[in-house]
Amino acid sequence: MPTTKKPTELGTEKISKLLYQYAIPAIIAMTASSLYNITDSIFIGHGVGALAISGLAITFPLMNLAAAFGSLVGVGAATLLSIRLGQKDYSSANQILGNVLILNIISGLSFAVVALLFLDPILLFFGASENTLPYARDFMHIILLGNVITHTYMGLNAVLRASGKPEKSMYATLLTVGINMILNPLFIFVFHWGIKGSAWATVISQTAMLFWQIGLFQKKDSFLRFTKESFRLKFKIVKEMIAIGMSPFLMNAASSIIVILINQGLIRTGGDLAVGAYGIVNRVAFLFVMVVIGLNQGMQPIAGYNFGAKNYLRVTDVLKKTIYYATAVMVTGFAVAHLFPRAVASIFTTDEQLINIAVNGLKIVFVFYPIVGFQMVATNFFQSIGMSGKSIFLSLTRQLIFLIPLLLILPNYFDENGVWYSMPAADLLSSIIAAVMLIHQFRQFKKKEAKNEIHPNINI
């Protein structure tokens, strides 16, 4: 694969080739990132203990909320950048780059300060018990100290992908994961830092790659680089970035609420180990989810560029191909969870009770996974072409409209299994809504392509 791609080739190169060139690096990066999370849990489970896995699971809502603020800037900027490049507006593209850096610093620091001030009450509200609170506190204290690093690193990685450098974005993620996987066992098993060692490994690895990213955007021969002018916040750019990034922000924020309800429901019906089992199921599920996210990240610049260039046949083509591949990924996840659940759970722990609970959760949560990829692609597609309202709605259907009521109702009838049942039920219902909206959008594209013109119903 070539190391760089000119943005203009997004409008001329064969779609399947572009999707391969942009999605494969993103998939590798996302899979590596997911594997890093999995190995984190493995090292913690075997090096610290079963309750430490439960403590780690307690931190998921706060991690999701931090990611929400990061995606509000990073994802919004990447989408807007792709559209501006499609419109050949290179001046605005450079301003977007500088604004991403400044906004990530502001949001990263603000979130960290507030979360650190109220860390114990937050974790207790999330479902921590006297047994799991020390683990959750030790881990999040260090992660929050490096939160501004995480925000900025993720934001610049999104910009790298959108600017036609998907492979450099992949290298940044792979190197981060590589450094982390070296430091993690060193800090846990050699230095005996416990769960704190895992957190320090994360912060140090992201810091190293952030300096590398900043160096890339300082090269004078790059069409996209930091300038003094780019660091001045532009109200119009900030407003558009936040409008587009609102969909992933709400999705991650809703995920925080969901995980809180899941943790509280499992604590109430199954105890600390049930929360640890969810931590295992969540890590495994996200391995496949991250592959689809990688596909979506590969689709995003192609769809955004061609939408900006008003080439709607290519927009439709990349969407169809992405749905096909995403479905294949999730079918694989379904097969793994139902054929080898005990083997998967045993990777994380030797605690037999924890394994049994995780096996049950894996079988239930993955039951409708073959259609989850479609719903994820549909949500990201509307975001990629700047239709943030539709993307936000689809983001909320699973998380808020369906999953929250189900989590409040089903445990009353099925106890612990009611918590597990809620997740696939929400997957099924939200996928039906996504299918209806996407079919309608296809029809609109066909009509407008026939007239060789389009009038978007949003300002991009």
Image (tube, rainbow, N blue to C red):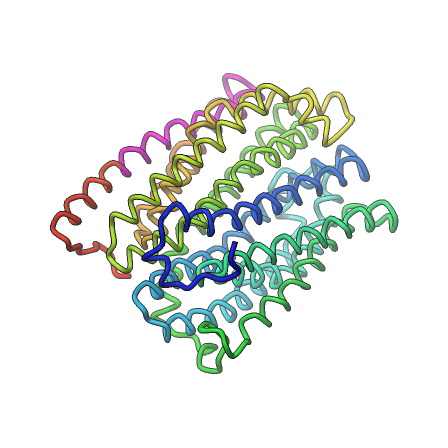
- In front of the other: 224 or 267: 224
Magenta-highlighted stretch: main secondary structure?
A: helix
Residue drawn at (42%, 74%), measured in percent from left and top? 95
Q: Is 264 colored magenta in this rendering?
A: no
Q: Quadrant of residue 324?
A: top left
Give how far across and how far down residue 236 sits, in percent. 34, 70
- In front of the other: 84 or 406: 84
Give how far across and how far down residue 78 sits, in percent. 43, 59
Give how far across and how far down residue 327 sits, in percent. 43, 32
What residue occupies the far top of the structure in this picture? Answer: 413
Residue drawn at (55%, 47%), measured in percent from left and top? 64
- In front of the other: 164 or 385: 164
**In the picture shown, does residue 249 fall above or below 420?**
below
Left or right: 16 as drawn, with respect to 448: right
Give how far across and how far down residue 424 sits, in percent. 47, 26
Residue drawn at (65%, 29%), measured in percent from left and top? 277
Q: Is 426 colored magenta in this rendering?
A: yes
Figure label count: 0
Q: Is residue 130 visible?
A: no
In which quadrant is the C terminus drawn? bottom left
Q: What range is drawn magenta here?
A: 411-438
Q: Quadrant of residue 94?
A: bottom left
